Image: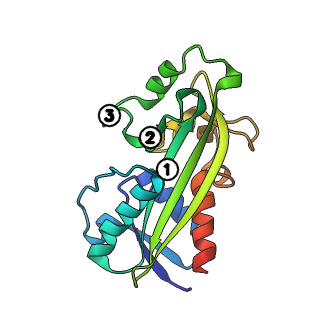
Amino acid sequence: MNNTHIVLATKNNGKLKEIRVLLAQSGIDVLCAEEVGVAEEITEDGKTLQENALKKASFVFERVHGWTAGEDTGLFIDALDGEPGIHTARWLGEGGDHVAYTLERMKGIPPVRRAAHFTAIVALISPEGKEFFFEGRVDGHILEAARGTAHPHLPYDVLFVPDEGDGRTFAEMTGEEKNMFSHRARAIQKMKDFLS
């Protein structure tokens, strides 16, 4: 599929940048919703990542009637019974210090009990209204102190060390290094394979 345009329902510039890099040279152009005149806030009140991703994609689809996508990501920390999970971006509301809050919640939890994983779900809607879902997951653990500089709008990157890496946090990696095995990269790669 050449020169496909997908409108992504997000206002997260960090997420948008990552996805554009992942789809570079694929013939798939990604526009954010605001670039096509859809500026309304989308309420993410689904019970699962899949529901939230589809809600975002559907909201934009109703306005543009072309290829649209929504993506939702959750950080699931075992010792916190899966929190923040689907509430990852909204755990503290706007402007809260997610890193400090996470570290406070995990105070005293030993390294062997700090397992966590990121899961990303991409919901894709075709111009005909068909829905498709793509999932990516990466396992790792939460540090006891932040390391690195967070990528824009991705605060948890300073705390999360993927099991498959070399001991660095996502924040200590370049964007290209992170994209080698991040949850979002895996979900987007599946979408890319599907579209091509």
Q: Find residue 161 and report its horizontal and vertical position in percent.
A: 66, 36
**How does the figure colour the protein chain or chains?**
rainbow
Q: Is residue 136 left or right of residue 10?
A: right
Q: Find residue 87 and report its horizontal and vertical position in percent.
A: 41, 41
Q: Residue at x 57, y 79 (%)?
A: 195
Q: Secondary structure at mark 3?
A: loop
Amino acid beneath label 2:
Thr
Relative vertical location of residue 178 with respect to residue 81 in this rendering, above or below? below
The residue most toward the top is 108
Quadrant of the frame with the C terminus: bottom right
| Mark 3 lies on residue | 95
Amino acid beneath label 3:
Gly
Q: Which mark is residue 73?
A: 1
Q: Residue at x 53, y 31 (%)?
A: 81
| Mark 2 lies on residue | 88
Q: Find residue 70 and report its horizontal and vertical position in percent.
A: 42, 63
Which circle's residue, 2 or 3, is located before the other in the chain? 2
Which circle's residue, 2 or 1, is located before the other in the chain? 1
Dots 2 and 1: beta carbons under 8 Å?
yes
Relative vertical location of residue 63 with respect to residue 33 in this rendering, above or below? below
Label 3 neighbour load within 10 Å: few <14, some 14-19, many 20+:
few
Name the one closer to the observer, 103 or 19: 103
Which circle's residue, 3 or 1, is located before the other in the chain? 1
